[in-house]
Amino acid sequence: MKTIIAKSLIFTSIGIIINFIFKSAAAKLIEKEELGLFFTTIDIFSFTLLILVGFRSSMVVCFAKTKDDVNIINIFRYFLFVVIFISWLIVIPYLKHRMGVNIHYWYLVFLMLSMGLVAYLGNQIAMYRHYHIMNKVTLIEPSLTLLWFLIAYYSFGIQGYHALFISSVMATLGVAVFMIQAKRNLNKEPSFKSIEMTDTMKQFLKNSIISTLEFGSGIFMIYLSVVLIMKHYTLDDLADFQVVVKTIFVYMILLFVFPVFRFILPELSKLINDNNHQKIATIKKEFYLFSFIVCSGLFLIIWFFGESLIISAFSKEYKQSQMMLLHLSPFFIFVMLNAYNIAYIKASGEFWWAFFLRVSGSFIVLVSFYTLKLFSDSIIIVVLSLIWGYVGMFLISFWLEIRLRKRKRF
């Protein structure tokens, strides 16, 4: 497990760097308005496919218990078809006629289909615990996006966001082809057949819906901070948070939190099913130590080099954001530890509790913000509110994890 996570960090880091190069190149070659429309389109498609991401955890947990991949994947296929169909009828016309994405209809259709295919294959790979394929995809996707963008722009002279849409379609199709080839000799594609809606499959369906709501609530908690800044502070404060703080925070989540749900959750699900108490305790101890080291390192880097790094990477205009990062960094440990606790709770099949935790986090953020605002108008209270949201979630999730371990006699 340590080797898998170490490889994940390396692949994700390289992927982030390549993605940053792609965004930097696009910003220099594509007009700002078109670039904004392109990334907004990608965000809307991604949020539309959120339900498919939410299925992943429940697929992992259900397969670890039942090994019934045929019914699990066939249920997932039905939902995939529904999401794609709704997107075709509603989302694509909205992008074309309301947002003004002036690009041929079939660009949007193929982008939605290719992203849906990657989500379908990605969930399968996670369910079967093919970690080596997941790590390679993390690196291949941004690499293909950058490569196809450069080919479209320089080799074929395709201008504007047409080059961006072509690169995204070709990259996602390339990732899909890679995943099909990589898993060909590992697992046979389950055949289409009628679903046997046993009690287990009904529970799987219920958990999938709850997991989708839980995943969406986690994203909402981060964007709640953006909403509070937009309502109570200046555009300068908003730029500091959006451009620097949220970017670094999201990159840290990609590096150190997402691997928990990609790798540790499937492993915990299997170990809980096998009653391997000792291995679970070892994983928890090692991850807690790893979290402390990561967050200590992050705090020291921002304390000693934060301002100079921000000025070098962005500009002097953003140097005030160091203070927000300085408050946020030592408490990132609660984001990591909370992720482990939620993974354990979901691996135990308690998806409702995981959803409750996410909702309670957003509630704590709001209560903390308006309480702190009675004493100060500083932009720092937004960061402190976000911190208290994660601290509160951790305390509740820690108590729930202990309760579950006692119930299972761990």
Image (spheres, grey):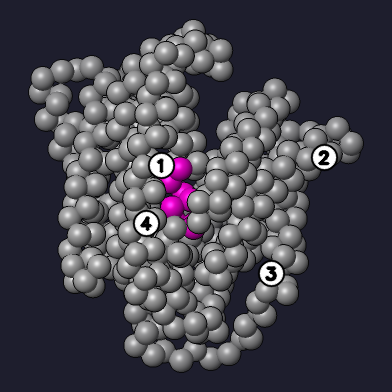
**Residue that carries the numbered disc 1 in the rendered image:** 290
Which comes before the other along the chain, label 3 or label 4?
3
Q: Distance between the residues labelled 2 and 1?
A: 42 Å
Say the numbered circle drawn on residue 40. Answer: none
Nearer-the-camera pick, 310 or 26: 310
The furthest residue to the top: 316
Marks 4/2 in contact by CB < 8 Å: the verdict is no
- Give the quadrant of residue 112: bottom right
Q: What element carries label 1?
A: helix
Q: How far apart are marks 3 and 4 (CA)?
A: 30 Å
Which comes before the other along the chain, label 3 or label 2?
2
Q: Position of residue 80 (x, y in %)?
A: 54, 70
- Which residue type does callout 1 highlight? Phe
Marks 2/1 in contact by CB < 8 Å: the verdict is no
- Which residue type does callout 3 highlight? Lys
- Assess whether residue 260 is covered by the magenta stretch: yes
Q: Is mark 2 on a helix, strand or loop?
A: helix
Question: Which of the two discs, 3 and 2, sits closer to the camera?
Answer: 3
Q: What element carries label 3?
A: helix
Tell me which residue sits at (46%, 91%) in the image: 196
Q: Is mark 4 on a helix, strand or loop?
A: helix
Which comes before the other along the chain, label 4 or label 1?
4
* Quadrant into which the C terminus falls: bottom left
Tag 4: Cα neighbours inside 10 Å, few (<14), some, or many (≥20)? few
Question: Which of the two discs, 3 and 4, sits closer to the camera?
Answer: 4
Magenta-highlighted residues: 256-263
**Residue that carries the numbered disc 2 in the rendered image:** 152
Question: Which of the two discs, 3 and 1, sits closer to the camera?
Answer: 1
Marks 4/1 in contact by CB < 8 Å: the verdict is no
**Residue that carries the numbered disc 4 in the rendered image:** 282
**Residue that carries the numbered disc 3 in the rendered image:** 183
